[in-house]
């Protein structure tokens, strides 16, 4: 079943994918640095006048919970990664590496880049989990994955 990105259903599918991923569990087993928020900037033309954000309660290779939140709440997370909808689509379709995106500032990181660099394998596993979710994107309404 494809999930609209973004939506609360997509967020829950992502949480399940993270929890079922042995690769993520291994790569993130020492992550104890707090929640990670993923924020989409407002895109009124796409029906996202306030943007969209995902709060991931991750710890020690587990996703203890995930929920859709407002951008203001997302910015309170220890790590918040913000980008345009198109940039997030590029990440979710494996056209933009998340670490390269943060280093080149195509993805804006609030939090320690040094810490994120220590968890490259974890970040890539998180993206593979997200990319595996059958997703319907706003622009074309096409199913990917």
Image: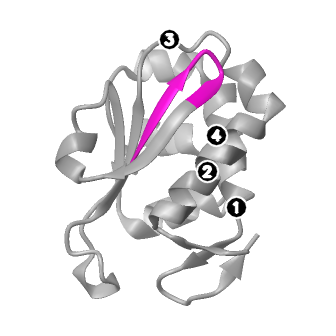
Disc ID at residue 82: none
Which residues are the magenta region? 54-63
Q: Which residue is mark 2?
A: 14
Q: Residue furthest left?
A: 72
Q: Judge from the rendering whether residue 117 lies leftward or rightward of residue 43; answer left or right.
A: right
Disc ID at residue 133: 1
Which of pointers 2 and 4 lies earlier in the amino acid sequence? 2
Which of pointers 3 and 4 lies earlier in the amino acid sequence? 3
Between the C-alphas of marks 3 and 4, the distance is 16 Å
Disc ID at residue 32: 3
Q: Which residue is mark 4?
A: 126
At 24% from the left edge and 53% from the top edge, which residue is drawn? 70
Between the C-alphas of marks 4 and 1, the distance is 11 Å
Which of pointers 2 and 3 lies earlier in the amino acid sequence? 2
Examine the image and state in which quarter residue 95 appears.
bottom right
Between the C-alphas of marks 2 and 4, the distance is 9 Å
Which of pointers 1 and 3 lies earlier in the amino acid sequence? 3
At 41% from the left edge and 27% from the top edge, which residue is drawn? 35
- The picture places residue 23, in percent across and down from the top left corner, at 80, 30
Q: Judge from the rendering whether residue 23 lies leftward or rightward of residue 59; answer left or right.
A: right
**Magenta segment: does it hold 122?**
no
- Which is closer to the viewer, label 2 or label 4? 2
Give the class, few, some or many, for how many residues have Cα within 10 Å of label 3's Cα (few <14, many ≥20). few
Give the class, few, some or many, for how many residues have Cα within 10 Å of label 1's Cα (few <14, many ≥20). many
The answer to the question of whether label 2 and label 1 lie on touching residues, with beta carbons closer than 8 A, is: yes
Q: Main secondary structure of the magenta part?
A: strand
Between the C-alphas of marks 2 and 3, the distance is 20 Å
Q: Secondary structure at mark 4?
A: helix
Q: Secondary structure at mark 2?
A: helix
Give the class, few, some or many, for how many residues have Cα within 10 Å of label 2's Cα (few <14, many ≥20). many
Between the C-alphas of marks 1 and 3, the distance is 25 Å
């Amino acid at each position: 079943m494809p999930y609209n990105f973004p939506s609360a259903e997509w967020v829950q599918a992502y949480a399940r994918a993270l929890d079922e991923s042995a690769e993520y569990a291994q790569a993130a087993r020492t992550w104890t640095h707090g929640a990670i928020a993923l924020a989409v900037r407002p895109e009124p033309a796409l029906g996202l006048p306030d943007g969209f954000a995902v709060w991931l309660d991750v710890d020690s290779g587990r996703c203890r919970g995930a929920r859709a939140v407002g951008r203001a709440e997302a910015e309170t997370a220890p790590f918040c990664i913000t980008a345009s909808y198109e940039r997030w689509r590029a990440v979710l379709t494996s056209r933009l590496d998340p670490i390269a995106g943060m280093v080149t500032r195509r993805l804006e990181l609030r939090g320690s880049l040094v810490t994120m660099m220590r968890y490259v394998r974890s970040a890539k596993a998180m993206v593979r989990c997200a990319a595996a979710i059958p997703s319907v994107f706003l622009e074309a309404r096409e199913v990917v994955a």
